[in-house]
Amino acid sequence: MKTLELPQTDLTASDVIVGLMRINDMSDEDIRSLYTASRDAGVTMFDHAAIYGGWHGCEERFGAAVTLSASERADIQLQTKVGIRQGYFDFSYDHIMSSVEESLTALRTDYIDVLLLHRPDALVEPEEVAKAFDELHAAGKVHHFGVSNHTPGQVELLKKSVTRPLAFNQVQLSITHANVITQGLAANMGGLDQSIDRDNDILNYSRLHDITPQAWSPFQKGFFDGVFLGDREHYAELNDVLEELASAHGVTPTGIAVAWITRHPAHFQVVLGTTNPQRVRDSAAGSDVVLTREEWYRVLTAAGHTVP
Ligand SMILES: NC(=O)c1ccc[n+]([C@@H]2O[C@H](COP(=O)([O-])OP(=O)(O)OC[C@H]3O[C@@H](n4cnc5c(N)ncnc54)[C@H](OP(=O)(O)O)[C@@H]3O)[C@@H](O)[C@H]2O)c1
């Protein structure tokens, strides 16, 4: 498992993150097995959000199931998110402060390593975010900050007042939902959907500003509509190529799907959503594979993207 020194922070973390959005209905024992398998595979970072599993539900399930010794707590990074409420978004000072307190209680920890603003709030007041971040940092309750699903303009607006570094941007990326990467490959081409810039060039902005991008839903075809792995009806060629490369590199197609993301020089962290320990191990093995440029482009075109 590769680790990354994360710019703008003092953190060194695995480039595979285990996301815990889907653990709400698991038994304590199964949550512990997932955690232990993740740690044994080299995972150091775990992703939560206030909204997962109902209000702080998955954080509470994790906190109840996994007892962290002081030294184990120091060896991992807990990341959570704030800002999504039932039917609306809320980056107000009061909401950020109360949600973080609830996350700390649910997770049974004194501090959060990384707090992300979950989805852009149209009514954001950067001064309120800045006040909340400064107080949370000064109190030692949150060590590092970032955003999720934010455009460069939205990050710049926050930076008008927020002085704590915004070190992360978590965005949707899989081989088949790859516009964040593929739009730039086909810039300025008429009549090609791929060339539409849907995020104001988040990726190059992140690289320019040392923001670590994190890829959520790395195996989903699109927005929560199932995985492309094994879907031969829609992605036969892609699955052929993934299987061929998996056998060439001694890993599984899941591992190659991870390797395709980690090969990008933006240094993505891949946020898994699997609840299956074997898939975590397969993903961790993929983190150690470095695809050649030719292999990387082969996967891209096999998924149907255009290399003009
Ligand atoms: N920032 C945001 O807005 C945002 C949005 C969504 C998610 N997230 C984060 O990203 C994480 C990952 O999201 P996700 O769960 O949608 O991602 P994912 O890893 O692409 O999908 C995981 C789901 O696919 C299933 N699956 C079925 N076959 C699979 C296979 N062959 N390989 C891998 N998975 C397979 C898994 O089932 P099994 O459990 O049976 O393996 C699980 O239900 C979440 O946990 C959360 O932390 C962030």
Image: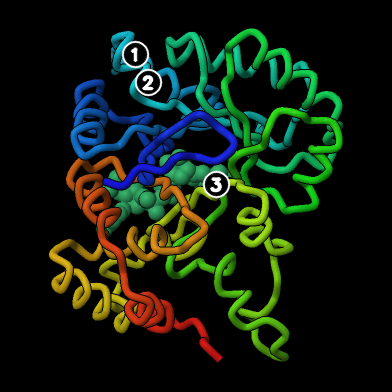
Name the residue carrying label 3: 212
| Residue at 48% across, 50% down | 216
Check disc 3 and report its element: helix, strand or loop.
strand
Mark 3 → mark 1, Cα distance in angstroms: 30 Å
- Hey, what amino acid is under mark 1? Ala
Residue 124, picture quadrant: top right
Is label 2 in a helix, a strand or a loop?
helix
Q: In the figure, is residue 1 to the left or right of 51? A: left
Identify the residue at image location x=28%, y=77%.
232
Which of the 4 image quarters holds residue 95?
top right
Residue at 56 percent of width and 91 percent of height: 308
> Which residue has dot 1 on it?
64
Q: Which mark is residue 61?
A: 2
Instruction: Look at label 2 and name its amino acid.
Output: Arg
Residue 264 lies, with reference to residue 61, above or below; the image says: below
> CB atoms at circles 2 and 1 under 8 Å apart?
yes
The label nearer to you, 3 versus 1, is 3
Between marks 3 and 2, how big is the CA–CA gap? 28 Å
Q: Distance between the residues labelled 2 and 1?
A: 5 Å
Tell me where residue 71 appears, x and y as whole percent.
Answer: 30, 12
Give coordinates of residue 20: x percent, y percent: 39, 34
